[in-house]
Image (tube, rainbow, N blue to C red):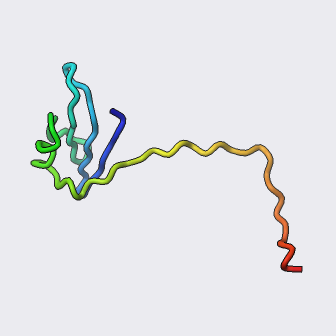
Amino acid sequence: MDRRWVGLDGYEVVGVVHGGRQLLRVRRHGWVVADCTSVAEVARHVDLADLCEVIELPARRRTEVRAEARTSSHHR
């Protein structure tokens, strides 16, 4: 469960495994508010419509060869 959602007022929801169970942990400003077993429980703490999923993009690999700047042929 590597997904994470953030909302207004410092809320964050992350998937965790606690005691062998998968839970949704609600945090606010880094402090644990609740461990929820369902989305309905999460909705008691934060408006679901305010949550946005955070998507981690892969790091862009650096290229060793730098492209030389040139002018376009239509500028001559």
62 lies left or right of 65: left
Q: Give the position of the C terminus as an image quadrant.
A: bottom right
- Seen as rendered, the residue at the extreme right is 76
Residue 57 is left or right of residue 7, and the answer is right
Q: Position of residue 63 (x, y in %)?
A: 73, 45
The residue lying at 79 percent from left, 52 percent from top is 66
Image quarter (top left, top right, bottom left or bottom right) of the N terminus: top left
The image shows a total of numbered marks equal to 0
Give coordinates of residue 64: x percent, y percent.
77, 43
Q: Give the percent coordinates (x, y) of residue 60.
A: 61, 45
32 or 55: nearer the viewer? 55
Q: Residue furthest top?
A: 20
Q: Position of residue 29 (x, y in %)?
A: 25, 47
Residue beneath the point at 12% across and 44% down: 40
- The correct choice, above or below, for 70 with respect to 45 in the image is below
In the image, 51 versus 31, the foreground residue is: 51
Q: 58 left or right of 6? A: right
Rendered position, 42 above or below 7: above
x 82%, y 63%: residue: 69
| Snapshot quadrant of residue 21 | top left
